[in-house]
Image (cartoon, helix red, strand yellow):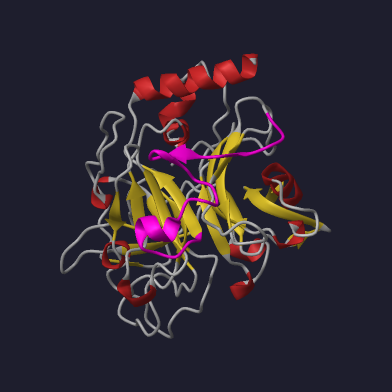
């Protein structure tokens, strides 16, 4: 959810990378929002169809259109591609739930693992718009859970800063044509619109299922060009995971706040994340880590509670315990960006 005007805030002095266009291989009833909502920072829930640039990854994606669809794409159905990212409009009704295939500017799926071996399980932009606001418990948090698409259940829930929780986007709102098998990555507030079968995604930070090793090192977060950004060992050490369990770590939910270069850990940079269950952790924890300030990550405090192991995600949302998607709503104004810039400046001076 990178915002182009973010780079105009001189307090930040952050470099915002340009986004290359990406090709939409197909689309079905996708209706971009011509007048996206842009309210003040507040603890209120905005509907999915009012928010631009929504992307998700399904654990079993068939080009966004499903097996056997030959009306939009003549010929055989597209092959499974677990690395495929899909844009969705969130419109309700008989012709709602429109989707379009989107390859984010960050990578080409074949660059790292060919075919169905390449499976993304977390999405983010390098300057997630509401990172500071959600960490500061000012706006609602969005979460998805493992098992959220089975039987047409709700893939995305919200938790307001004041505590109430509820459904934000249903299965048919996310994908009204094929449904959602397992939403396994979420990103909003990106570029909006589709024209001549071309759409842009702002995802430029991502994680791969299992956090596999590359050149002998296991990584949890990647940047454009399939560039390793954060090693899994650093994440494991930050959350206190024992060295014996560190090889099993798998980051599966992500928000980022960094300057857009190909390094991480400078002043003012931070990450919000969750992992799959391993050792003492049940997958329902959410951590915030600013490595410049501390070698240890801290549990997110939001909604009147701490997102630690003691908090029952299943009890609060009626879902599974493991979180596999993170985001936030609604969109801030320029005043909020000034607040973010001031926070970044304070971190640099610390």
Residue projecting furthest to the right = 216
Specify whether residue 68 is painted magenta. no
Comparing 99 with 168, the one in front is 168
Residue 266 higher or lower than 155, as above or below: above
Q: Residue at x 51, y 55 (%)?
A: 284
> Which quadrant: the N terminus?
top left
> Which quadrant: the C terminus?
top right
Comparing 283 with 40, the one in front is 283
Residue 328 picture location, percent across and down? 39, 43
Q: Which residues, given as a range, are shown in magenta? A: 294-322
Residue 190 seen = no
Residue 117 picture location, percent across and down? 64, 72
Q: How many marks?
A: 0
Q: Is residue 130 left or right of residue 20?
A: left
Residue projecting furthest to the left = 94
Comparing 50 with 69, the one in front is 50
Residue 202 picture location, percent across and down? 47, 46
Could you say which quadrant of the image residue 271 lies in? top right
Residue 270 higher or lower than 313, as above or below: above
Comparing 347 with 6, the one in front is 347
Residue 25 picture location, percent across and down? 43, 66
Residue projecting furthest to the top = 349
Residue 32 higher or lower than 238, as above or below: below
Q: Residue at x 28, y 61 (%)?
A: 30
Q: Main secondary structure of the magenta part?
A: loop
Q: Is residue 235 left or right of residue 62?
A: right
Residue 58 seen = yes
Residue projecting furthest to the front = 310
């Amino acid at each position: 959810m990178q915002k182009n005007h973010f780079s105009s805030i001189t307090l930040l002095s952050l470099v915002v990378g340009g986004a290359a266009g990406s090709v939409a291989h197909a689309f079905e009833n996708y209706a971009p929002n011509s007048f996206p909502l842009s309210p003040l920072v507040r603890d209120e829930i905005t509907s999915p169809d009012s928010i631009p640039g929504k992307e998700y990854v399904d654990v079993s994606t068939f080009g966004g259109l499903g097996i056997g669809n030959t009306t939009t794409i003549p010929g055989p159905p597209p092959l499974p591609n677990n690395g495929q990212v899909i844009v969705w409009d969130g419109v309700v009704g008989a012709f709602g739930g429109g989707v379009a295939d989107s390859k984010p500017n960050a990578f080409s799926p074949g660059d790292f693992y060919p075919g169905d071996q390449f499976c993304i399980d977390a999405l983010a932009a390098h300057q997630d718009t509401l990172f500071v606001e959600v960490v500061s418990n000012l706006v609602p948090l969005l979460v998805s859970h493992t098992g959220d698409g089975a039987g047409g259940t709700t893939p995305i829930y919200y938790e307001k800063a004041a505590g109430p929780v509820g459904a934000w986007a249903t299965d048919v709102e996310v994908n009204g044509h094929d449904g959602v098998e397992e939403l396994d990555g979420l990103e909003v507030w990106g570029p909006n619109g589709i024209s001549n079968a071309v759409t842009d995604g702002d995802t430029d930070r991502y994680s791969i299922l299992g956090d596999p090793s590359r050149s002998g090192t296991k990584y949890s977060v990647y940047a454009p060009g399939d560039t390793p950004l954060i090693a899994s060992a650093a994440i494991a050490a930050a959350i206190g995971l024992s060295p014996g369990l560190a090889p099993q770590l798998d980051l599966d939910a992500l928000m980022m706040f960094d300057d857009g270069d190909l390094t991480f850990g400078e002043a003012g940079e931070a990450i919000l994340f969750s992992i799959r269950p391993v050792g003492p952790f049940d997958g329902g924890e959410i951590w915030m880590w600013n490595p410049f300030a501390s070698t240890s990550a801290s549990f997110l405090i939001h909604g009147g509670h701490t997102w630690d192991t003691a908090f029952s995600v299943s009890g609060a949302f009626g879902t599974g315990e493991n979180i596999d998607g993170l985001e936030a709503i609604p969109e801030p104004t320029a005043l909020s960006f000034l607040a973010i810039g001031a926070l970044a400046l304070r971190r640099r001076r610390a």
